[in-house]
Structures are given as structure tokens and as C-alpha cells.
Image (cartoon, grey):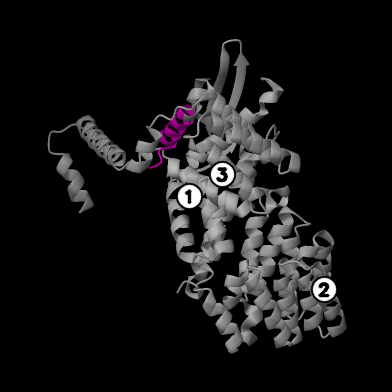
Amino acid sequence: MKKKWLTGFRKPGCSRKLWLTAITVLAAFFLISTLNTCIREGKAAGSIENPSIAVIPISNSMCDPEMEYLSAGMHDAIIGELGSINSLLVKSQSATQRYLDSDLTGQQIGNELGANIIVKHSMVCTDQGMRLLVQLIQLFPEEKEIWKETYDLELSNSLTIYRDITKQIVKNVRADMTQQEKTRLNTERPVNSELYKKYLQGVFYMNKLTPEGVKQGFRYLNEAIAIDPSDPLPYLGLALGYSNAGHASDAGEGAAESAKKYALKALELDSTLAEAYTVLATNYLYREWDFVATENALKRAISINPNIASLHYTLAWYLCLKKDQLPAAEEEMKRAMEIDPLDPICPGYLAWLYFWVGKYDNAIEAAQKTLELDPNYPMAHYIMGSAYAEKGMYDKAIESHKKGAAVSPALKCGLGVAYARAGKKKEALEVAAELEKYNSYWFTWGLADIYVALGDKDKAFHWIEAAYNQRHDFVPWFKNYVYYKDLYNDPRFNEIMNRLNLPA
């Protein structure tokens, strides 16, 4: 058949040159047709498959050092705008921040972060104002600049410029955009220059997570609200600030309620703020135990910006409440790790999820990966020790728990459980007595664990009830907690779990 088909082009009297010309024309026709099809489908030739982007932070050395808040805000804003595009995987601010003034090549950074594209930007301050240079670099198979642009930057037009940068990046990596994403990026977002300056300063100082920084940040954000109470940005800054500041300042008492109040106010003014929904989802899940509101907030947030790591691990813990959703919960934890591959909390939470449901070998493996990122991360030592104890490897378990407790006594309960599992009742009771002296809601869960391991159900229920009454973060997950499997048939346990109105 093939021979007959070719002869059809070589009719008697046709020259070899004419035959080759016909083949060339036909090939060109097919190439143009293919290109047109690709363009119609939004997948032009040369597109970067599975674009994974890292925005490298800029040095402020060429500008006033006191303007460091601006370069930090710029880095965060560009990541936020890119993160709103569902077809892109965008590395987090915390993952990329460590490459400020780094000597590593783009490919080295890409290999560490799992990125195939980097965005570099630099700021130059002149007598005429600020100028922003942005470069888009494809990393593999070799580093190649695929786009660059220079912008005259003012605070009043900066948000619009960040959206234009995002449009240009999406265009040059030939990624897909929904109509909703296009509409948002084509909407200009002017802002009051003085308000935006106060907002950036407020976020910058609060992110230091020191008592002084938090207070200074709150002051700047409240000054921003005084300039224009109708702008959502300062309220969002306060919501995030109160959500994160509980361990860094005296804002801890009532901080959750303040975070919720400001998140709701920000969303009242702008319903497209993914970070505000993130604050609400966290509050609903861990503090209010409102699971319907949790699911709604998580879905809304991820639809706006799917590139926030905390959204995915919070969704994972929500899914973990439903036993048939454990594979989906695992995938969400892994997605968080893709977005923020250098934050130990992501593999740490994956390790904890594995342990919580009794997958001890998986838990140990994930904990080891966590310790590669931070050898002193207490959560990883706790998970590793707890998994070893359940596998009967008591010496290793006790050793791991001692390492973790030396860094943070908050997880010392694991040592008490390991002693109990190893038959060392006296040592387990000593740990329990030590934790009881703290008189803290946090240790109610750990004390219940120790007494379950000792087989003392009455004392275990005493502390489970205390954990419920003091609204310990972990209580909703007790129902699927491998440690409490011996309590599942006890009416006291089911009565407490029924109060929670857990998702079906």
C-alpha cells in the first residue's frame, strides 16, 4: 500500500524535483494546520509542559535600605498574582525567600525547588523614581531568557503592574487561563500610595514575628485603615497578623476572634481574597469545629488561589475527618509539599497524618525527610518516636522522644507513651505527673494518650473530656486516632464524639 501511495504522486512524466516539491508543500500544509490547531486550543508549539515557577526575591541594595519593606512586598505580591492561575504551580514566598542574593545558578535553584522556570526582578531607584526590571527564564535543558520587560513603578500603580507581569508570564509560558482569571487580571487595581506604603510596612514588620515587630505592624495597618476605611488590604493584613501572632506577642489572648473579625471585614470589601478565606478556614476547623463552614471556606480559597501550601494541608486535615477520604488527604499534603518544598511543616504534617491512621513505616519515612530539612524539628522526632513505639522498637522510640523533648517540651507526652508501651509504668507516670503540673489545655491530649497506653481508661476519659471542654485543636480527629481504637466501643467515647457533629 505504501508503495502504491507514493507512486500516485510520481505520475509518468513528472520530474523528481516536482515530486519533492509536492511532498514539501504537503508537509508545510500539515505543519501549519497543526500549529493552527494548537493555537486554537491554547497550546502553541514550544509551550512549557507543567510550568512550575519560582519567583526569586530581589535585593534592595540599589535603593534606600529603609525601603526593604517594598522589595519584600513586591516579591510577595508577584507570587500571589501568579498563584491565582490554576494552570501554574508557584513556589511559596517562604521557599523562595532563602535565595535572596544567592550565588546558586538558576538550574541549581530549580533542582532544589522542583521548578522549571524562574522569575528574576530587580529594582533601580533614580531621581526620576523607581524602575522595575523583570526577567522570565526557562531553566531546562539549559537556562534561556524567554521574556523581559521594564516598568516605571509607583506605589499607586504597582498592583496593576503586578497583574500585567502575570499576564505576560502566562502568555510566554503558554499556560491556560480561565475567562474568570483573564477578567481579574485585566481589571486595574489602583491604590492610595500612602495607604499601600503603610500596608506594606505593617505586613513587613509583623512577618518578623517578634513582639516589637507585631506591635509596630499593627500600628502601621491601623494607620492605613484611617487613610481609607474602604480598602480591604489593611484588614487582610490584620487578619493574617492576628492569625500568626498568637505565639509572638500578647495578642495571643483573643487573637483568633480578632483574626476572624478582620478576615470577614476584608471579604466584605473584596470577596476574592484567598488569604482571608484561609484565616477563616483555619479558625472554623481548629477552634469553632464548624465543619460545613470549613469546607466552604477551603473550596472558595482554593478556587481563587490554589498555590497556598497551608490551604492544602488544612484541607488534608479536614479530609482526614472522613475515613474514606484518607487517600485524598494524602494527596493534599503532597500538594502542599510541592508548593513549599523547603518548609518542614509540610512533610511533618504528612508524617503525622500517616501516624494518626496507623501507617507507621510511611510515617517514619516522611519524618526522616522532615529531619533532612531541619534536624531539630520536634514534630519529626515525635512522629518517629511514636511510630517506633507502635512497632515495638522501644529503645529507638525513647531515644527519638528524648531528642524532641529537649527541643520542645510540648510533645513530651510521646515519651510517656513510649515508656508505657515498653512496660516502664513508673517512668510513664512520672512524665504524666510532670505534664499535669503545667495546667495547660495543650497537655490534655497528651495525658489522655499516656493513660490509654497504660490501660487506665477512666483517667484517659478524664483527660479526653478535659480536652473537649478546653477545645483542644486535636479533638475532632480523636474518632480516627489509632491510639484510641481500644476506646471505640466504649459509650463514653461515642458520646463525646457525637457532640462534635463531624462530617459524614
Quadrant containing the N terminus in the rendered view: bottom left
Measured Cα–Cα span from mark 1 to mark 2: 40 Å
Q: Is residue 456 visible?
A: yes
Q: Magenta span has 175?
A: yes
| Occupied quadrant, residue 428 | bottom right
Return the disc, 1 or 2, that comes first in the chain's sequence: 1
Identified by mark 1, the residue type is: Pro
In the image, residue 341 sits, relative to residue 177, either above or below, namely below
Q: Badge 1: few (under 14), some or many (20 or more) residues near its Cα, within 10 Å? A: many
Q: Which residue is mark 2?
A: 398
| Front residue (pair 461, 382) | 461
In the image, residue 297 sits, relative to residue 499, either above or below, namely above
Q: Badge 3: few (under 14), some or many (20 or more) residues near its Cα, within 10 Å? A: many
Of the two numbered discs 3 and 1 in the rendering, the one whose residue sits closer to the viewer? 1
Q: Which residue is mark 1?
A: 306
| Mark 1 vs 2: CB contact within 8 A | no
Identified by mark 2, the residue type is: Ile
Locate residue 498, reporting x and y percent: 52, 79
Residue appearing at x 48%, y 70% in the figure: 325
| Front residue (pair 192, 18) | 192
Magenta residues, as a range? 160-176
Q: Which residue is mark 3?
A: 115
Return the disc, 3 or 1, that comes first in the chain's sequence: 3
Q: Is residue 88 visible?
A: no
Identified by mark 3, the residue type is: Ala
